[in-house]
Amino acid sequence: MSYQALTERMAGISDVLGAISLLTWDARTQMPPGGAITRGRQIATLTEVAREHLVAIETRRLLDKADAETAGLKPDTIERQSIANIRAALAFHDRVPLDLLRRRANLSSDAHAAWLEARRDADFAAFAPWLERMVDLTRELADAIGGGGTRYDALLDLYEPGMTWPTLQPLMAELRAGLLPLLGDIRNAKAPRSDFLRGHFPVARQREMVRQLAQILGYDLTRGRIDDVIHPFEVAMARDDVRITARYDESWLVPGLVAALHETGHALYEQAVDPALQRGAMTCDLRTLYLVGGPSFGMHEGQSRLFENHVGKSRAFWQAHFGVVQALFPEALAGIDADTFWRGFCAVTPSPIHFGSDEVSHDLHIMVRVDLEHQMIDGDMKVADLPEAWNARMKVDLGIVVPNARDGVLQDVHWPTGQFGTFSNYTIGSMTAAQIFAHAETLPGVSDGLGRGDNAPLLKVLSQGLYRHGRRFSRAEAIARFTGQPDSVQPYLAYLDRKYRNLYAL
Amino acid sequence: MSYQALTERMAGISDVLGAISLLTWDARTQMPPGGAITRGRQIATLTEVAREHLVAIETRRLLDKADAETAGLKPDTIERQSIANIRAALAFHDRVPLDLLRRRANLSSDAHAAWLEARRDADFAAFAPWLERMVDLTRELADAIGGGGTRYDALLDLYEPGMTWPTLQPLMAELRAGLLPLLGDIRNAKAPRSDFLRGHFPVARQREMVRQLAQILGYDLTRGRIDDVIHPFEVAMARDDVRITARYDESWLVPGLVAALHETGHALYEQAVDPALQRGAMTCDLRTLYLVGGPSFGMHEGQSRLFENHVGKSRAFWQAHFGVVQALFPEALAGIDADTFWRGFCAVTPSPIHFGSDEVSHDLHIMVRVDLEHQMIDGDMKVADLPEAWNARMKVDLGIVVPNARDGVLQDVHWPTGQFGTFSNYTIGSMTAAQIFAHAETLPGVSDGLGRGDNAPLLKVLSQGLYRHGRRFSRAEAIARFTGQPDSVQPYLAYLDRKYRNLYAL
């Protein structure tokens, strides 16, 4: 009875978080410009409402009673894991004062505005004072969170519970050691044709392409919708209302394609949560007060990367489905066959910009930023020294000469908005995707299905083995239960090596 | 300082109500079907959050301090009126228990589902038990509200503060006495052509028509947007985000036209609230927990009726703007001139259905329902006797033989959802519109502007004299301050008599 009442209370928080999701989605896809200022306040107010609801005495009272009531259950039951999640969230909010979160939100808003101007002018010096203040405030946040490790560990844990720098750093080092020679070899090899990806691709037809590809992957449009946006994202209002967005470039097909595959991956994850968990502690990130289908940002990104790369950038997928895209753009893609299209779509094209980068460059970009922000938070990297360090590392790792700060250290929104410790989740996602996919391929029917372009058997084993659990198990636990293995970068490196040495005939 | 803190607290409620507005708008315009069940819960949860925030001890503490702090100010200052509004809302919620509101919401949901089926089958008997329960529960609500008058008075006051049956009934009787002979004369006269309003009107062009007409009336699309919907409505997320919706019938131009004019009227009202009042007790209906630009449903409806009828159904408007519509539908409207179009659009065509009725029939429909529901709540009208009473009154007042219950007593959603006491606001709106318009016409520049199809001078005097005040003055006070007159039905009757005796050459 008390556990049931506790779940009802968490369901109320889910409702508020669902409303925040809608306010956010609407702001980016539908809202008239006049709504902007009030919208920020509406989101801030509802976020505080959710927090108040969580930290209230009534929650603690129900939690203690539910704890006693379910004390005899095994630790991995939904009841015990739900209670543990709520306790962890309460501990977090008890340590992090509301005033600090408000100061962070205000600074984030001001620093974001300053960053937009500095980026426009490619003027790092104009942004540096804001970044210094943000680093200071982020250290203050890390100190408040505590947790026994370093400040950066505290930040990592916020987005990827259980992750620490001593665990992450060797994984990244191993990945980098594998990627650098692969990229070096690719740079010396003959590139496949990819010229046909640029041309004239009317937006209305790209929208139709995204809709068809998303449905081929298994996206249920009776429980979702697709809208235009500048920066694509996926967001859930509820388990049965999971929306994706796409960006279109009329002269370049890649952004639309990538949005279709990547955001659909996120959405498939959320749409498959067990309906019984949909309004409670298993679908809320109660620390970051965010409605989410999985236990961490890395786990979520793992599913988007899985469907973007392992499915959507596979030869078999395009052999089965290239006809859909070619039929929509018969002139631009005249004379192109499925294999040529697939090779062009996968082409490795290092660029100073992370956003939209190929599979081989992608994590090298990520690791540049992660190493530098780690040194800023835990080490002695000064903000003033960032551009030089950034440019040097880009030269070494990607062979890129950064032309200016706009296309270099100023390119990304994470730092201006104080999101330190989360960028690594893109790489954790890549590793997670490969590890999950390598195991899923071995399960009955999956490879055969993918071989004929049928995603359904894969989605079924993922839903059964992983997705239905929502936030019940941590990412590492979920992987261990599904694959029987601990976190490892090897499946990812093996996948990239096999695929790209074949594709580039190395 | 305390008054400021109180306003901040009310701003938080505005934020929650704004989120509820968005959840509602999205449910009707964008949401995938899967989202429906969770959406109902999200709206219910946020409504309770808003209520809790209002009735909390902290609100009462701030209210008492702000009251003392502003005790020396005049009663009609924003501060004193705001405090009075909050006190009235608190008194309401203290009297009406949450449990009763929840039971009403649940019954409303079930009765609505039963009504949909009963209406489909034109089977009043299937719906009667639900309506009986709804009448009982509505009486319970009225008893809880109290207020010293009858039960129906308590319900009227909920939507139109200060209105009572002894005040409303004579106004309605006077209106009916004026309308019946006018309608009788019209029924014996030759009808103007209106055949051209039926034909082929592609939806995409109707959307463009609505956009252009709304902008001609003064709707600011940088602070609003227009979407397709089944039942048109206007809704505000904030003062600078006021959205309208329209319904389109590809073979009939009238629904799109009416939505453009009527919903724009509502939106103009909300868009003109003083920005200083936009997040506080002056833009919230804190009793019904609703984000609203004005002090009552009747005042709001007054503005939609004003722009729909007095502006949008005026000869001058179409002499100036018929070209916009004709250019969009050159085939369907070939050979039609502005005057013919205006006469056809205004044609009096009594029908059993209230929705979409002409200006002369409109309030006769309203009064049938208001009289019957008054007798159900305060008198001895039995649910079982409703169909006969309905059909008899439709015959006497509108000369209509009701063909079946679907097009008769079952036609409308108000009773199934327990909205007793608010239907009269449509007629209060008609009266209010005429009274306000009659005075506005006398102000400098207004008649000249309207004569050349320019709405701007009218909108300016309305915004200055009425709209900017939000909920500061009651409808009756606002009218009295603007026109110098008490509530009166005479301007409305005079307007209809003059217009239709001329149009029908009576």
Image (tube, coloured by chain):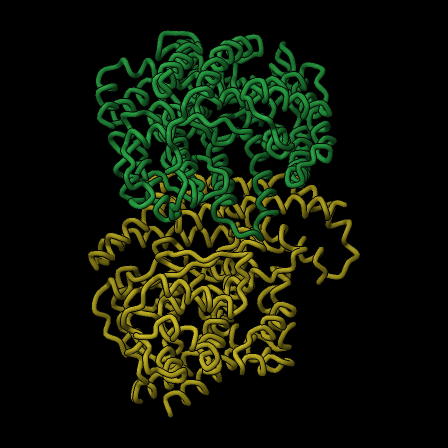
Chain colours: A green, B yellow
Q: Horizontal and vertical percent for residue A239?
A: 38, 32
Answer left or right for A3 relative to A36: left
The residue positioned 51% from the left and 47% from the top of the image is B96
Residue B294 quadrant? bottom right
The residue positioned 47% from the left and 53% from the top of the image is B143
Residue A432 quadrant? top left
Q: Horizontal and vertical percent for residue A221?
A: 32, 39
Residue A275 visible at all? no
Q: Horizontal and vertical percent for residue B217?
A: 52, 70
Name the foreground residue: B392 vs A214: A214
Considering every residue shown, the one lying at the far bottom of the view is B506
Name the foreground residue: B134 vs A91: A91
The residue positioned 67% from the left and 15% from the top of the image is A378
Query: From what the image shows, is residue A314 above or below residue A220?
Result: above
Query: Considering the image in quadrants, where does the N terminus of chain A appear?
Result: top left
Name the foreground residue: B83 vs B31: B31
The residue positioned 29% from the left and 41% from the top of the image is A334
Query: From what the image shows, is residue B312 above or below residue B417?
Result: below
Answer left or right for A143 relative to B216: right
Query: Considering the image in quadrants, where does the C terminus of chain A appear?
Result: top left
Count the labels in the image: 0
Q: Horizontal and vertical percent for residue B368?
A: 35, 70
Answer left or right for A388 relative to A46: right
Query: From what the image shows, is residue A452 above or below residue B445?
Result: above
Residue A309 visible at all? yes
